[in-house]
Image: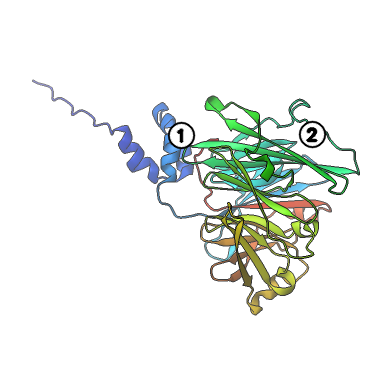
Amino acid sequence: MKRRRRPEKEILPVDVVTEEILTKLPVKSLMRFKCVSKLWSSVISSRYFSNRLRTVPSRPRPRLYMCLRDLTDYQNSVMLSLAPDTTSSCFVVDHDLTIPRLGGYFLQYLPGFICYNFLGKPRIYNPTTRLLVTLPAAMKSNNMMPIPTPPPGESIKIVAYYFGHDHVIDQYKVLCSTGVRLKNFQEIRSEHRVFVRKAGGRGSWKKAAPTSPADFLPHIPLKGGVCIDGVIYYMGWTDSYNSVLVSFHIRSGDFKMIQVPRRDGDELPGRVKNVSLIEYGGKATIIDQTNLREKGRLDLWAVEDAGNNKWSRRTLVLQPSQLHLVNNNIIFNVKGTTQNGKVFLIPQDLLSPFHILWYDLQSNDMRKIEINGVPDHWFSKDKLKVKMMLMDQSESLMYF
């Protein structure tokens, strides 16, 4: 009696598994499926697959990350993950994704990454993969930073980190800008270093300088930058009356500087706290909320032609029925924009009940969004700083 031959098992090609199955799964499921086999782990962890996943159309899932830090206890910090409640207009803390003792303050957001500074070192964190990368400080030794620390009380020294990615060459870079102001703006010194991430996870800081130093003034950098189409932007001031927008091209390494529009009699130190740099409509945009509380007015300055120092201005005035949202004792700061043109305004202090404002720049509509689930003990602290950042698409497999 002849034995029947078992039909051979059909094995799906790797490209079919990748293109037709894996790219359609949520990122959290992909992280679990890395345990299926070494092949799946290799495919899911590859940079090719991470880049391919970014091209798959998906529904944006806004998510807020909230950093709470007790100033009386440096180690007492927590990062809360908040997701929108589908049944009401609020965000709710996802306690399963709460990360204790992460430390540091948010500096910038790159798609899929939270970038922040901790103990003088830049850190890049992926909330989905839970991967944390700590880079060496740019000022590791005096040989690396010729700008001396000024005497206390006479001058200030600011060190700011900015993060960027060029999707054309798929390269990440970190820019460190250091500025020193001596004796009430009588002299300003500045210098820049760039950290290039190389294969194998290694890299180093290298000194960078503008190709046209005559058109590039020493400046004090302001914390908080944006990266648009492979160009890092950040603000700085060159004296007490003039501020500039600095750009750094990741691919070419070129620096540029353009003057920020200024009103007559407007001193920068008093204005800095009311301006933020955002991406709006694919352009570097300065949003000025100086007149938001009293007049309900928001001014937007967008870069139209950096070569000719050309800006466009747009003024938004709140609807009278919504003016009460900002005309109160709560101080709000702009922190992040969504892909469809919404701006988040975050309270400076943690108050109970806690809420944020969601401002749609397209329709000129502002809404109040409640934040639920923050642990009660945080509201009882005397000295507390709260930092929040919007991540429009929270899930990403990208590796720094």
Q: Label 2 crowding class (10 Å Cα cut-off): few <14, some 14-19, many 20+?
A: some
Residue extending farthest top: 1
Taking 134 as reference, is 267 left or right?
A: right
Residue extending farthest front: 214
Q: Position of residue 157 (x, y in %)?
A: 81, 41
Query: Can you tell which mark lies on residue 342?
Result: none
Can see residue 34?
A: no
Q: Is residue 391 above or below residue 19?
A: below
Q: Nearer the viewer, mark 1 or mark 2?
A: 2
Query: Can you tell which mark lies on residue 47?
Result: 1
Can see residue 155?
A: yes
Q: Is residue 368 above or below residue 144?
A: below
The picture quadrant where one finds residue 201 is top right
Q: How is the image coloured?
A: rainbow
Depth order, front residue of 193/17: 193
Q: Which residue is mark 2?
A: 147
Taking 36 as reference, is 158 left or right?
A: right
For the point 62% across and 60% down, the residue is 344
What's the residue type where badge 2 is placed?
Answer: Ile
Residue extending farthest bottom: 320
Q: Label 1 crowding class (10 Å Cα cut-off): few <14, some 14-19, many 20+?
A: some
Q: Is residue 297 above or below residue 35?
A: below
Depth order, front residue of 324/95: 324
The picture quadrant where one finds residue 321 is bottom right
Depth order, front residue of 326/369: 326
- What whole-number distance in Å separates the C-alpha atoms at marks 1 and 2? 38 Å
The picture quadrant where one finds residue 1 is top left
Quadrant containing the C terminus is: top right
For the point 38% across and 46% down, the residue is 24
| SS label for mark 2 | loop
What's the residue type where badge 1 is placed?
Answer: Arg
| SS label for mark 1 | helix
